Every structure is written in structure tokens, then in C-alpha cells.
Image (spheres, rainbow, N blue to C red):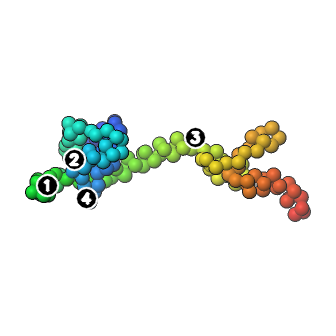
């Protein structure tokens, strides 16, 4: 019987799976604290534990029981399958971010480097050209003079 991938249809679920670790794991309380620190909102245990049980039932995490300071605690640790899910999720998220960032980038007209913030623009023959730095702009503007002198 194959298990289906857990629904990662909310930021809370994505944050939870990304915060889990393969070697050390985290308790439900630790996950709630980490999510609160990241988002400013503490998720309820009624939200955390059902999702952790869904991950466990799907074979994505294991529960490790231990005693700490005289209290029984459960730590949730990613399995190999869970680690693969996290890697795939990070790849998908990276692809989405790359696609969005690509829309925000300009390209240096001279050297082709992708630009996010630092840019130099010059209106040349009625066309606004973007360069990564003043050196590329100057090199582009002087290319005719340089090639004329090299002949």
C-alpha cells in the first residue's frame, strides 16, 4: 500500500515539516515555540499534534520517547522518507522563488549579469539601457572608440 504525500496546503504545515530534523528532532512544544518565534503567532496543540500524527502515519516521521527532567517526552524525528519530502519541498520552493526573482531582475546590457538592486541606467539613442556598474556602462559607451583604435 502506498501512502500519499501529506497535504502541505498551509504555511503552518510547511513551517512544521521544515523545522523537523532528521537527527535530533523536536518535541511538539519546541515546534510551537519555533513557529511562534518565526511568525509571532503560537499554534495550538490542536493544530500541531494532528499534523504530526498524519506525518507519522505516512511514515515521514518517527516518535522517539525519552525522559527529560523526570518527565516523559516525545520527540519527532524525520525518517528518510520525511527527509526526501523536505528536500523535494525545498526544491519546489526554490523554483518558485527563482521564477519570481527572475521577474524582478534586470540584465546588464554590456556583460549580461543579472541585477537585483545595484544598477546604472543610461539613455542611449532614446533607449534606456541598464548596466551592472559604471565600468560596464563606460566600456559599452567606449566600445566604438576602442575598436576604432585597435584597427
According to the picture, the residue beneath numbered tag 1 turns out to be 65
Q: Helix, strand, or loop for circle 4? A: loop
Q: Quadrant of residue 66?
A: bottom left
Label pair 4/1, CB-CB below 8 angstroms? no
What residue sits right under mark 4 in the picture? 24
> Visible in this render: residue 144?
yes
Task: Give the residue at the far bottom of this rendering.
Answer: 150
Q: Earlier in the sequence, mark 4 or mark 1?
A: 4
Distance CA(mark 1)–CA(mark 3): 47 Å
- The image shows residue 146 at horizontal and vertical percentages of 85, 59
Marks 2, 1: nearer the viewer: 2
The residues bearing labels 2 and 3 have C-alpha atoms spaced at a distance of: 38 Å
Quarter of the image for the C terminus: give it.
Answer: bottom right
Mark 3 and mark 4: span between their CA atoms?
A: 38 Å
**In the picture, which quadrant includes the N terminus?**
top left
Which comes before the other along the chain, label 2 or label 3? 2
Earlier in the chain: of badge 1 and badge 3, it is: 1
- Of tags 3 and 4, which is closer to the observer? 4
Distance from Cα at disc 2 to Cα at disc 4: 13 Å
Vertical comparison of 137 with 104: above or below: below
Residue sitting at 72 percent across and 45 percent down? Answer: 121
Q: Residue at x 25, y 59 (%)?
A: 24
Dot 3 corresponds to which residue?
103
Amino acid at each position: 500500500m502506498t501512502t500519499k504525500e501529506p497535504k502541505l496546503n498551509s504555511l503552518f504545515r510547511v513551517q512544521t515539516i521544515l523545522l523537523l530534523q532528521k537527527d535530533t528532532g523536536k518535541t511538539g512544544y519546541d515546534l510551537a515555540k519555533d513557529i511562534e518565534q518565526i511568525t509571532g503567532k503560537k499554534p495550538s496543540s490542536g493544530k500541531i499534534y494532528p499534523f504530526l500524527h498524519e506525518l507519522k502515519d505516512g511514515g515521514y516521521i518517527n516518535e522517539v520517547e525519552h525522559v527529560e527532567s523526570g518527565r516523559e517526552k516525545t520527540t519527532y524525528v524525520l525518517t528518510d522518507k520525511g527527509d526526501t519530502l523536505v528536500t523535494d519541498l525545498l526544491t519546489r520552493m526554490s523554483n518558485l522563488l527563482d521564477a519570481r526573482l527572475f521577474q524582478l531582475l534586470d540584465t546588464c546590457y554590456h556583460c549580461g549579469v543579472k541585477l537585483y538592486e545595484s544598477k546604472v541606467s543610461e539613455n542611449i539613442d532614446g533607449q534606456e539601457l541598464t548596466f551592472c556598474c559604471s565600468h560596464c556602462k563606460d566600456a559599452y559607451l567606449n566600445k566604438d572608440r576602442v575598436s576604432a583604435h585597435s584597427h
